[in-house]
Image: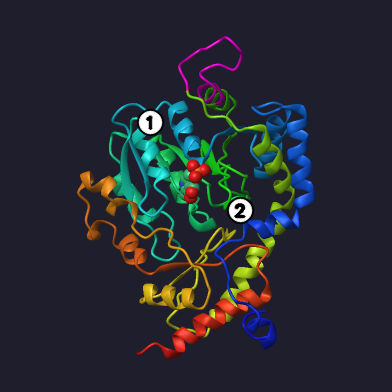
Amino acid sequence: MGYAGVAAEARASVKSVPLIDLHAQYISIKTEIDAAIAAVIAKSAFIRGPHVEAFEEHFAGAIGAKHCVSCGNGTDALYIAMRALGLQAGDEVITSAHSWIATAETITQAGGKVVFCDTDKDTFTIDVKRLADLITPRTVGIIPVHLYGQPADMDPILALAERHGLWVIEDCAQAHLAKYKGRTVGTFGAAATFSFYPSKNLGAIGDAGAIVTNDAALARQMATFSRHGGLTKGEHEIEGINSRLDGLQAAVLSVKLEHLPSWTRIRQAVASAYDQGLASFSEITRPVIAASRQHVYHLYVIRHDHRDALANHLQARGVQTGLHYPVALPFLEAYAYLGHGPDDFPNAFHNQSRILSLPMYPEMSDAQRAHVIGAIGDFCARKPK
Ligand SMILES: Cc1ncc(COP(=O)(O)O)c(C=O)c1O
């Protein structure tokens, strides 16, 4: 159901639509969440312990990976994975020009050199046609990002990586349960990193993250590094960092993990209703899904040539929107030292001023969605041509 099929009175009753509604999610599973939190507090199992171990096992199972190493957040997950893979000073790592800064800044923090690759204009994922040209004798790895919840084109990435002896870390922060050629993302590379930031498809009640892998030795190395360099109290094989998942987050995440498959299906249904409702507005570019990908719609991102005017119009109609992200990574001040210009990343540059994230969350009502579509329709109808 798109715009039509929702009674006018129901639409008229909607005053505002947030980008995401975490309170509505909490209310929908309040009893389970409250019980899980109480159980952790009753046992004082605050750092690691049975809740963390149980979540690691469940999450690895949900992704189809052999091992899950939980940690403090999705940024640490990237850093830990790269350190455990043995990144050396000056090693080059290729990643997407269109992502959250965590994907790139951790390369530098781990001692590497960031090499940006432009994105495919329509899917926003790393442009596999441009990857080969970026490989040098110093390249050690590739970090594709399954941006917004759509998998990157993994087959050519893996083929190239194998040919050049490179590792691949999938940045799955926005793509829990997304599928590429029928297989859940997170099992394609040497390791895959996840964020459980509260607004993510699987979100904690604070910061949380994890890395999954099928490689037992790598899992051990990552766990060791993230826990001060030792898995046994008093023993430190190496110097590490402190990045641990706490019991409260783990218990909440285990509850939410049970709901994730149905929440994902609802996100996909909301997206197809948006697709249908927006189809007649020719100036709106809807999300483009490449063949053999299952998008999980962490974000539903449209494009419009007058994006800011559309966003302002929607705000005036009570519709909250977002920009993910307003400036592509190579054009941020943080990367000015690389000296890049728009011509180096034409697709990322083209998209950064056109993208607009619409409200997307499983608890969204039909009337709220119809309100968003109606407000966009009004904008398209009145915009001077
Ligand atoms: C693509 C991507 N990578 C990495 C991260 C980092 O995750 P966290 O915020 O949990 O550190 C995020 C989170 O926003 C992300 O969207």
Query: Is residue 243 left or right of 160 when viewed as pictured?
Result: right
Q: Position of residue 63 (x, y in %)?
A: 65, 44
Per the picture, the main secondary structure of the magenta-coloured stretch is: loop
- Please state, as top left, top right, bottom left or bottom right, where the C terminus lies in the image: bottom left
Q: Which mark is residue 110?
A: 1
- Please state, as top left, top right, bottom left or bottom right, where the N terminus lies in the image: bottom right
Q: Position of residue 158 (x, y in %)?
A: 47, 44
> What kind of element bears circle 1?
loop
Residue at position x 29%, y 58% in the image: 345
* Residue 264 drawn in magenta: no
Q: Nearer the viewer, residue 211 or 247?
A: 247
* Label located before the other in sequence (2 or 1): 1
Q: Position of residue 4 (x, y in %)?
A: 65, 86
Residue at position x 28%, y 45% in the image: 334
Q: Which residues are magenta?
A: 223-240
User: How many neighbours does mark 2 have within 10 angstroms: few (below 14), some (14-19), or many (20 or more)?
Assistant: many
Q: Is residue 91 above or below residue 96?
A: above
The amino acid type, in three-letter code, at marker 1 is Ala
Residue ranking furthest to the top: 234
* Residue 239 drawn in magenta: yes
Residue at position x 36%, y 33% in the image: 109
The count of marks equals 2
- The residue under label 2 is 201
Q: Is residue 334 above or below residue 46?
A: below
Query: Is residue 88 left or right of 6 when viewed as pictured?
Result: left
Q: Is residue 164 above or below residue 173?
A: above
> What kind of element bears circle 2?
loop
